[in-house]
Amino acid sequence: MTDTETDPTMIWHKTVCVLCSNNCGVEVRLDERTITRVRGNKAHVASKGYTCEKALRIDHYQNARGRLTAPMKRLPDGSYIEVDWDTAIDEVAAGFQRVQSEYGADKIMYYGGGGQGNHLCGAYGAGTRKALGATRRSNALAQEKTGESWVEGRLFMAHTHGEFAEAEVAVFVGKNPWHSHGFDEARRVLKAIAADDSRSMIVIDPRRTETADLADFWLPVKPGGDAFLLAAIGAVLVEENLVDTEWLAQNATGSAETIAAFATVPIADFAERSGIDEDLVRKTARRLAAAESVSVVEDLGIEMAPNSTLISYLQRAVWLLVGSFGKPGGMTTHSSLAPLINYSATGNEPLDPVSGNAIISGLIACNDIADGMLSDHPERTRALLIESSNPVHSLAESEKFRQAMRAAEFSVVIDVAMTETAQEASYVLPAASQYEKVETTFFAAGFPENKATVRPPILEPLGDSLPEAEIHSRLAKALGVVTEEDLEPLRAAAEQGYEVFAEAFMGVAAANPALAGIGGVVLYETLGRTLPEGMAPAAVLWFSAQQLAMKQSDALRRAGFRGEGQALGTALFEALISNPDGVVFTKHEHGQSFDMLGTADQRVHLAIPELLDELRRLPEIPSDYTTDEFPFVLSAGERRSFTANTVVRDPAWRKKDAEGALRLHPSDAERVGVEAGARVRVTTRGGTAVAVAELNDTMMPGHISLPNGHGLAYSPAGGDPEIFGVSTNELTTTDWKDPIAGTPWHKYVPAQLEAVQS
Ligand SMILES: Nc1nc2c(c(=O)[nH]1)N[C@H]1C(S)=C(S)[C@@H](COP(=O)(O)OP(=O)(O)OC[C@H]3O[C@@H](n4cnc5c(=O)[nH]c(N)nc54)[C@H](O)[C@@H]3O)O[C@H]1N2
Ligand SMILES: Nc1nc2c(c(=O)[nH]1)N[C@H]1C(S)=C(S)[C@@H](COP(=O)(O)OP(=O)(O)OC[C@H]3O[C@@H](n4cnc5c(=O)[nH]c(N)nc54)[C@H](O)[C@@H]3O)O[C@H]1N2
Ligand code: SF4
Ligand SMILES: [Mo]
């Protein structure tokens, strides 16, 4: 026998990196509970051995100090004591029931439901929401992606995604995939495009990012100037007759109106306002029009900046005007194992009774939550259930969210760590980490093949922590929505195999809507018991697989799954739970992009009247919000080599940029009188902070940046925690946001700088 077979520390365990939405497949070695080695999993269906530097030190997530090991209860003096699970569950259920009876179940809000590597908790949390009758919900998507989902709903009633690995022209708008990824093997793909003379990369970013360095066309747009730039690119397509009118006639409605609106754009003026030479604007438009295929992705650089919803529309209008949808390398719809957000906006969204603002994709705008809770509005939210997210740190104006939590009648946080948010909660429930339970994500947007990875636990839960499925199950029982008697017949059916179980489960779901509402917990408690050790929380995926099999049976068959009715879904489910290398769950053919459009006529609805009005009004809209008091534009939350939202709390994880430097152009440093490595004070309308200055000539003069995911409380040696770096949301305000989606303008925070005398 070799060492590898006898020595447990030599075994490679398959899992994924949980630090960004890509979830690259990795293999890790363990010494007791320590992850000692990490390498890319070459057999992984999506990442094929690829990782970035962040994965290699993942033990700093798994074994950080300050992991929660027992339920915590807040005492009136603000301190916490450990309580046992039975006490915690009973008191949490009673706390929510008190709010239900005093204020109404609709005053309970559920926030979160998953991070970068864990979405099963959201599937179970949805059940608890139903059990509580809590209709209000929100999560981080409502501070970045709701403008996009509103636009996608209007255009497609579906989500679109690019095929960057195949695209002739790849366009990144306010997106730095070198560091933030967002599609498989990002750096390999970027390098391949850069190395191929027949392909082009277009990067729209004020900073000369690592991605911009590889680009054929880098458009250093002035911060906040993207609407002008994209309007001008669209206008050039129209003016120079570069629009694919044939494609539009066949596949879209509303083209004439849209083209007419672009025709009114003053190209030279808008180019100038965006800071880009008109000649470069024209060359960019021509390159797009000449391409066989164009794939575009926007991200926070525009989603968290002025005119964000309009820009989400304009960039899509540009690739639609050149007809780059539904062809290899172009934009496409895709299947989904379980959609994280819906793309069904019509323009008549329901309104949040407290703020009066639109609830897009079912999510209350993040920027409205704390303001609402701190108001005296009779409909205000009174209780919060927060799961796998850290809104005190991640939402605008941290202090306001802290106050909102204190103003709440009751709040519960389910997390692995005593986070900034947990520190304000009535109860904190300890979750097993993402390596201590089975988990997956629903981010996958691949086409023609779409892939998912369900990875089994590689460690036992720490202390008394529990997988969320178990926490939600205990809550459901304490709330009285499910009893052992309800579950027994289904457990017996599950013993007899999937076919018998499926029939029994569907029967119960039809007869008992309350049980159907917590279907996840029911599956966990019944089917889950028949699954291999540690896999019970994956049971909810059986239902996702069934639903997908109903909607996409041909695509499942093309991916190799066999069977009729429930058997087809079950075949997918069984593949999912037994393949830590990941599974191709659907396979399509290119023309089928159109089949997945949700519009009744299966065409693109190119004209969004409200946004065409906005486009026509653009000449009067400011492109600069700086003032004498705040002359700099702060990009508050840049993705860097070692940032991962607040998933990794241990600063020792970082090999560089330990404090999260404030980047500024050398000429600005000179003007402010600050040297490299010196301290600099940054002040905004929202607050002030001191950071280390990094002189960086990739920044545009006047543009400064701070990284995301810093400013977390951590105690390296135990004892009182210290704060490492700047928490950007100590500098932001809830009122600084997009008028349509309510998403924050974190990438455009007017700021002042001054040298700090040491
Ligand atoms: N390393 C790392 N990767 C991550 C994460 C992480 O924390 N760390 N988080 C993940 C998450 S949750 C997300 S949402 C994504 C976000 O991924 P990205 O959106 O790519 O990340 P950011 O660095 O926030 O912003 C992207 C770019 O926007 C540019 N920008 C700033 N202002 C403007 C502007 O006015 N116009 C334009 N066009 N660009 C502008 C910035 O210079 C920056 O290069 O990253 C994911 N991946
Ligand atoms: N100023 C500014 N603010 C920003 C951004 C920015 O660029 N600038 N970016 C924004 C973006 S795009 C995003 S997506 C948000 C992200 O912000 P959030 O949605 O709040 O998410 P994370 O910071 O990723 O926090 C994830 C939480 O999950 C916990 N956790 C980890 N594993 C588990 C688990 O297995 N179970 C449970 N229950 N919990 C777990 C972690 O401890 C952490 O508290 O931040 C946003 N905030
Ligand atoms: S951080 Fe993202 S890209 Fe990097 S290894 Fe982890 S999942 Fe992959
Ligand atoms: Mo995000």
Image (spheres, rainbow, N blue to C red):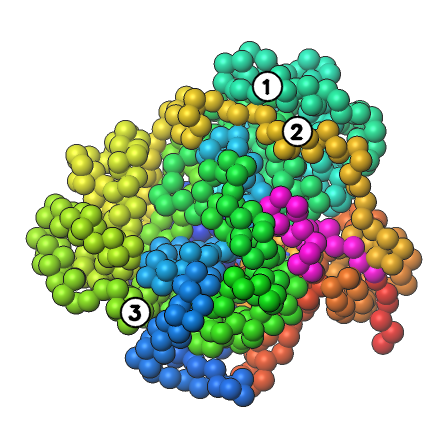
How many residues crowd mark 3 within 10 Å: few (<14), some (14–19), many (20+)?
Answer: many
Q: Which mark is residue 255?
A: 1
> Along the line of sight, which residue is nearer the eye, 520 or 553?
520
Q: CA distance from mark 1 to mark 3?
A: 53 Å
Asked where in the image residue 470 lies, by quadrant, the reply is: bottom left
> Along the line of sight, which residue is nearer the eye, 499 or 757?
499
The three-letter code of the residue at mark 2 reads Leu
Q: Which mark is residue 346?
A: none
The three-letter code of the residue at mark 3 reads Leu
Position of 248 relative to 667 (above/below): above
| Residues at discs 3 and 2 in contact (Cβ within 8 Å) | no
Badge 1 element: helix
> Along the line of sight, which residue is nearer the eye, 277 or 15?
277
Position of 71 relative to 117 (above/below): below
Q: Which mark is residue 612?
A: 2
How many residues crowd mark 1 within 10 Å: few (<14), some (14–19), many (20+)?
Answer: many
Residue receiving disc 3 = 479
Badge 3 element: loop
